[in-house]
């Protein structure tokens, strides 16, 4: 018995720029704090909840619909990373029975995210050079922050701040480049060709 099959064409927009910008802009602002340009305040926490958090999760769900496992995993994971980070800051003050994480607990948290990001970085070798830079610099950032928390060395945290600003701006560039290139129909802002052919 023959069955008719229908393939629905995907006409939805590319959600990657939203995810990259949500990640990048929030990362820049937090790491300006780590580099001691200003203190931790509601501006950073608000960005962590809404743009770094919710917007990335939404972008990830849209990538899931497009069957892009890598982007869905990345955006949803990092979106919830930001929401978790805000919870770690806010929960102890809202609920006194909940203790704030110790320095070593935060180091373990950051190391685990560093390992996750390192494996995702490996995956970017089938993607653009721009994404390789974003994930490579993010891997370094997580391990620098973990070392700073574990050692209590403020100089390492300040160094991580500057490195994180670079990482964040690389994500902003990658997101905006995708928007501009799509609008103009050509690569006005280079992203680098994939290292290997994509299948």
Image (cartoon, helix red, strand yellow):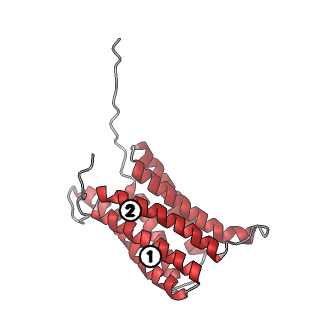
**Residue toward you, 132 or 47:** 132
Determine which of the numbered discs, if any, sits on residue 76 in the image.
none
| Res 150 → quadrant | bottom right
The percent position of residue 44, horizontal first and vertical second, equals: 55, 73
Residue situated in front as seen by the camera: 110 or 90 = 110
Q: In what quadrant of the picture does the N terminus appear? A: top left
Which mark identifies residue 121?
2
Nearer to us in this view, 2 or 107: 107
Residue 4 screen position, x and y as percent: 34, 19
**Left or right, 179 with reference to 103:** left
Task: Give the residue displayed 44% in from the left and 76% down from the top.
Answer: 164
Q: Residues within 10 Å of mark 2 (few under 14, many from 20)?
A: many
**Above or below: residue 123 compared with residue 110:** above
Q: Determine whether, in the image, residue 106 is placed left or right of residue 199.
A: right
Disc 1: which residue: 164
Residue for point 53% across, 64% down: 112
* Relative height, residue 47 to residue 194 (above, below): below
Residue at (58, 73) in percent of width and height:
107
Q: What residue lies at 30% left-to-right and 55% top-to-bottom?
A: 126
Instruction: Judge from the rendering whether residue 7 lies leftward or rightward of residue 142; answer left or right.
Output: left
């Amino acid at each position: 018995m023959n069955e008719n099959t229908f393939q629905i064409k995907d006409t939805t927009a590319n959600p990657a720029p939203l995810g990259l910008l949500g990640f990048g802009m929030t990362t820049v602002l937090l790491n300006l704090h780590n580099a001691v340009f200003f203190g931790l305040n509601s501006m950073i926490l608000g960005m962590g909840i809404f743009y770094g958090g919710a917007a990335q999760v939404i972008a990830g769900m849209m990538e899931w619909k497009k069957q892009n496992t890598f982007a869905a995993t990345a955006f949803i994971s990092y979106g919830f990373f930001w929401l978790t980070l805000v919870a770690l800051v806010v929960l102890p003050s809202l609920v006194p029975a909940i203790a704030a994480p110790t320095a070593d607990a935060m180091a373990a948290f950051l190391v685990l995210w560093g390992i996750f990001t390192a494996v995702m970085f490996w995956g970017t070798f089938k993607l653009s050079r721009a994404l390789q830079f974003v994930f490579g610099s993010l891997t370094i950032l997580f391990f620098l922050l973990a070392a700073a928390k574990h050692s209590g060395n403020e100089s390492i945290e300040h160094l991580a701040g500057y490195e994180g600003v670079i990482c964040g701006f690389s994500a902003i560039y990658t997101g905006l480049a995708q928007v501009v290139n799509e609008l103009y129909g050509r690569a006005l802002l280079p992203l680098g060709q994939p290292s290997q052919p994509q299948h």
